[in-house]
Image (tube, rainbow, N blue to C red):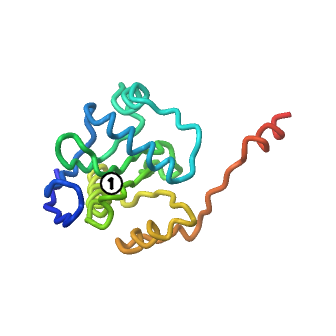
Amino acid sequence: MMRSMTNLGDKPAAAAIEIRPMEQADLPELLRLMHAIVAYERGSNFNLDEQELMRRGFGNRPEFGAFVADGGDRRLTGMAVHYEIPFMHSLQPLLMMKWLFVDPEYRGTGIGKLLFQRMAVHAKSIGHDKFCWFVLKDNANAQAFYRSVGATPDPEWDRWMISAPALTELTR
């Protein structure tokens, strides 16, 4: 468990933030944070609910995990959601960070860095020498944060996709 005493100044929070793995009792708050980041990313079709998070995060074969920043009273101030791509040419799974998100009122307090550090500890503890994630092209603040912790854009890969209309056309 990583713990940090964070001076939040005029931020509306307790003085202590605990970074820990998600628990079932966190699902309502985790869902709130997930909805917030999807809205920030201009996403649509948000179909997650607590039952789906329970099934996918705590089922027989969990599909994702998360580290949460607990500000006390079960109020989560941030999250780092991760999953593994199990099959790779290297025979080593690839650890992906799906979302790193801190509530806007808690940004600049060090919570994001604590969550990112916890992801790094997790990666090392399960045998990874790296992990990957995506960043919106116009999210300069996130890009600056990631650079500040030593991360760089992948020089070899760009993300590609096929849109729904193109997929439909391709299958005709």
Q: Give neighbour class at mark 1: few <14, some 14-19, many 20+ (Cα, 10 Å).
A: some
Q: Eyeballing the image, is 49 above or below 81?
A: above
* 146 and 78: which is toward the camera: 78
In terms of image quadrants, where is residue 2? bottom left
Does 86 sit left or right of 166 as displayed?
left
x and y, in percent, of residue 49 in the image? 44, 30
Residue 89 shown left or right of residue 71 in the figure:
right
Looking at the picture, does residue 44 appear above or below residue 113? above
Q: In the image, what residue occupies the spot 32% across and 55% down?
A: 119
Identify which residue, 42 or 60, lies in the foreground: 42
Residue toward you, 114 or 88: 114
Q: Where residue 29 sits: x, y (%)?
A: 32, 39
Residue beneath disc 1: 123
Residue 39, horizontal then vertical, whole percent: 51, 48
Question: Could you tell me which quadrant the C terminus lies in?
Answer: top right
SS for callout 1: helix
Residue 115 appears left or right of 45: left
The amino acid on which the numbered mark 1 sits, given as a three-letter code, is Ala
Count numbered badges in the picture: 1
Q: Residue at x 35, y 55 (%)?
A: 102
Give residue 98's position: percent from left, percent from top.
45, 49
